[in-house]
Structure formats: C-alpha cells, structure tokens
Image (cartoon, helix red, strand yellow):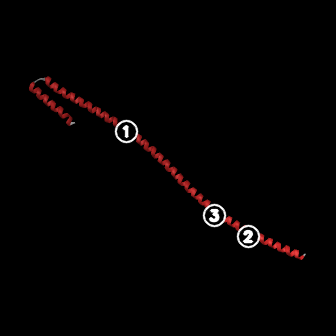
C-alpha cells in the first residue's frame, strides 16, 4: 500500500510546491487529476484482479467439492469391493471344506469298493467251495447208487 500511495504523496507535494511557487490552482488541479486518474486505473486493475482471484477461488472450491464427492464415491466403491472380496474368501474357504469332504467321501467310497470286491471274492470262493462240495456229494451219491 505504501508503495502504491508513495507516487500520489510525491505528486501532492509537487503540486503543493508548484502551487506555492506559481500560485496557479489549475496546475495543482491538473497534477492531482493526473494522479487521481492513475490511482483510479490502478484501483480498477486491482478490482479486476481481485475478481479474477475470487472467480478462481470459487472454481477451485467447486473442484474441491467435486473431488471430495469423487473421493467419497471411491471410498464407498472400495468398501463394496472389500465386502465382495471377504465374501469371495469365505466362499473359497467353504469350497475348500467341501472339496475336503468330497475327498473324504471318495476315500470312503473306495474303501467300501475294496470291501465289496473282497466280499465278492470271498463269496466266489465260498460258492466255488460249495459247488465243489456239491459235486463231490453228487459223485458220492451216484457211486452209492
């Protein structure tokens, strides 16, 4: 402010000296009017600059609000993705448990199959022994007759 008012103060002093020296009020008026015009132009320039800064500030506030909104949306999306990920991990754990259960069932079925095969082999052996025994008994009966 001091830098901007210093030329005006110097002009007023010069105008005052000119008035005291020449005694011409028109000279003082001309010098002061020149400074007033200069300060008016400077004031207009500063007002325009202030308005431009204000507009820029408003634009930045708008961008900040939009960015904040975007950030909140992104955070909500992130929370949804994390929830989906947790569900997927839980589902994966459940599938692993089911795979283990299926593996256990497969081993049990294989054991039952092995037992059934052994039982069939035992039955065949018994049937074969019974057939052999029946054949022997028929031969014995047929020899007795």
Placement of the N terminus among the 4 image quadrants: top left
C-alpha separation, residue under disc 2 versus residue under disc 1: 90 Å
The residue that appears at 66% across and 65% down in the rendered structure is: 111
Q: Position of residue 81 (x, y in %)?
A: 49, 49
Between discs 3 and 2, the one toward the N terminus: 3
The residue that appears at 55% across and 57% down in the rendered structure is: 93
Between discs 2 and 1, the one toward the N terminus: 1
Q: Is residue 53 above or below residue 103?
A: above
Element assignment for label 2: helix
Do the residues bearing badges 2 and 1 touch, measured as CB atoms within 8 Å? no
Element assignment for label 1: helix
| Residue at the spot of label 1 | 61
Between discs 3 and 1, the one toward the N terminus: 1
Element assignment for label 3: helix
| Residue at the spot of label 2 | 122
Is residue 82 found left or right of 24 in the rendered image?
right
Is residue 48 found left or right of 116 in the rendered image?
left
The residue that appears at 86% across and 76% down in the rendered structure is: 140
Do the residues bearing badges 3 and 2 touch, measured as CB atoms within 8 Å? no
| Residue at the spot of label 3 | 107
C-alpha separation, residue under disc 3 versus residue under disc 2: 22 Å
Looking at the image, the residue that sits furthest to the right is 145
The residue that appears at 17% across and 27% down in the rendered structure is: 32
């Amino acid at each position: 402010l001091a830098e901007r008012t210093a030329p005006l103060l110097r002009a007023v002093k010069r105008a005052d000296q000119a008035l005291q020296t020449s005694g011409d009020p028109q000279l003082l008026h001309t010098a002061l009017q020149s400074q007033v015009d200069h300060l008016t132009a400077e004031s207009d320039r500063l007002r325009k600059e202030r308005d431009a800064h204000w507009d820029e500030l408003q634009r930045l506030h708008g961008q900040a609000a939009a960015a904040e909104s975007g950030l909140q949306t992104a955070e909500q999306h992130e929370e949804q993705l994390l929830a989906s990920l947790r569900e997927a991990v839980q589902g994966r754990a459940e599938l692993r448990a089911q795979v283990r259960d299926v593996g256990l069932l497969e081993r049990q079925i294989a054991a039952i199959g092995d037992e059934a095969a052994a039982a069939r082999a035992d039955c065949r052996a018994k049937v074969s022994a019974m057939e052999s025994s029946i054949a022997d008994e028929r031969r014995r009966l047929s020899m007795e007759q």
